Image (cartoon, rainbow, N blue to C red):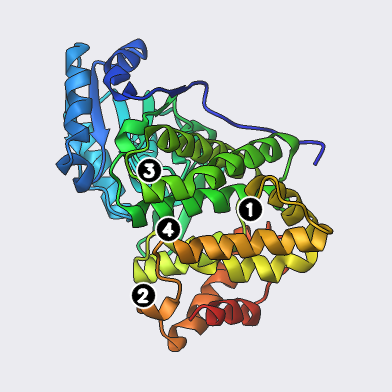
Amino acid sequence: MTNFTFHSPPRVICEIGGLKRIGTLMAGLGVSRAIVICDAGIAACGFAGRAVAALTAAGMTATVFDQVQADPPVRVVRAAVEAARNFGANGIVGLGGGSSLDTAKLVALLIHSEQPIEEMYGTDLARGQRLPLIQVPTTAGTGSEVTWTSVVTSEANEKKAIYSSQLLPDVALLDAELTLGMPAHVTAASALDAMVHAIEAYTSRTRKNVVSDTLAVKALDLLGGNIRKVVADGTDIEARSAMLQGSMLAGMAFVNASVAAVHALSYPLGTRFHIPHGHSNALVMGPVMRFNMPVAEKEYAELATHLLPGHRFVDASAAAEAFVSELEQLVASVGLETRLSQLGVTEADIPEMAREVTVGIQRLLANNPRDMNSEEVAGLYGAVL
């Protein structure tokens, strides 16, 4: 695509041990009262306390909201906004995985807004200015720290996305120390989520562009080259840092080029069965990519050289097949369940999920390289049941 607009945060800091700088960074944004938005697990492991200590040391008053839930329900977002208002926050720190970071974005925007969150669903519909915002990921997966989107679960139990340039943070802070010791299955699922971001950005039918392409292939270099290392050894700090960088680049790529059918099919698995987002993507990635192969072979072949460096392929068809096969083998090798039935999904659930995808998530299917109808979506679910 020749004409495009690329959005990114003004500053990215990648520094091992960088969480200790959160206070001086927030002070530089003029903040005096900061609230850290996270989940209970991040609070329990001490990361939120470390952030508060750094903020306090820089002269700020700080507190924590630690009730974020996966696939954040709108009611939890509202509770976080209310907590921030009651505290009198004038700066927000998002700390954790994608759900915490997405919640933090909305808190920063909604705290002084009277606009109902339901009016923000879609693109460029949010109004008002957000508070200063710093995003600190603790997983290498969502890339939410550099995106201008926030995904929530509506009161009708549907995933809804808000796209707004106001959601881009002032600073994205990548500290690989925060990812050390992450369980292998969480590491694997998060990494596969980031790899899907890179792949779907590169194959996007509607918004693919030269900047997102460049970021996507570098992201795949970093992610593919380190995923097995971090799954095997949770203490490899250099590999962990590389994964955070790959996730960040993939996040920049996909938010500007868009994701597609893999994400569309993963959404009902998250809202209905509470399967973690990265794992949901991993479950349906292989079938969707094989469905796309007739029209995406060229792009898959190009990506094969980054996932399988040094391999020599007879032709584009062989390269594309090797690329998809390698991803399927990767999913099978990292210890995640590979069948929907292992996670509570039954054949009876498939028709309604397929309807939800083709009716309610058409915005993502429109970006997919190949058109997909409800019967085809049901078949893809069935392939991994």
Q: Quadrant of residue 340?
A: bottom left
Asked if marks 3 and 2 touch (Cβ < 8 Å), the reply is no
Asked if marks 3 and 4 touch (Cβ < 8 Å), the reply is no
Q: Position of residue 295 (x, y in %)?
A: 79, 64
Along the polypeptide, which appears first: circle 1 or circle 4? Answer: 1
Q: Marks 2 and 1, Cα distance to the nearest angstrom? A: 25 Å
Residue that carries the numbered disc 2 in the rendered image: 343
Q: Marks 1 and 3, Cα distance to the nearest angstrom? A: 20 Å
Residue that carries the numbered disc 1 in the rendered image: 200
Q: Is residue 379 left or right of residue 38?
A: right
Q: Secondary structure at mark 1?
A: helix
Q: Position of residue 76 (x, y in %)?
A: 27, 51
User: Three-letter amino acid code at disc 1?
Assistant: Glu
Q: Secondary structure at mark 2?
A: helix
Q: Marks 1 and 4, Cα distance to the nearest angstrom? A: 15 Å
Nearest the camera: 228 or 251?
A: 228
User: Three-letter amino acid code at disc 4?
Assistant: His
Residue that carries the numbered disc 4 in the rendered image: 277
> For the residue carrying disc 4, how many other residues have a C-alpha within 10 Å: few (<14), some (14-19), or many (20+)?
many
Image position of 91 with respect to 261: above or below? above
Residue that appears at 80% across and 56% down? 298
Q: Position of residue 309 (x, y in %)?
A: 67, 45
Along the polypeptide, which appears first: circle 3 or circle 4? Answer: 3
> For the residue carrying disc 2, how many other residues have a C-alpha within 10 Å: few (<14), some (14-19), or many (20+)?
some
Asked if marks 4 and 2 touch (Cβ < 8 Å), the reply is no
Q: Secondary structure at mark 4?
A: helix
> For the residue carrying disc 1, how many other residues have a C-alpha within 10 Å: few (<14), some (14-19), or many (20+)?
many
Asked if marks 2 and 1 touch (Cβ < 8 Å), the reply is no
Residue that appears at 25% across and 42% down? 80
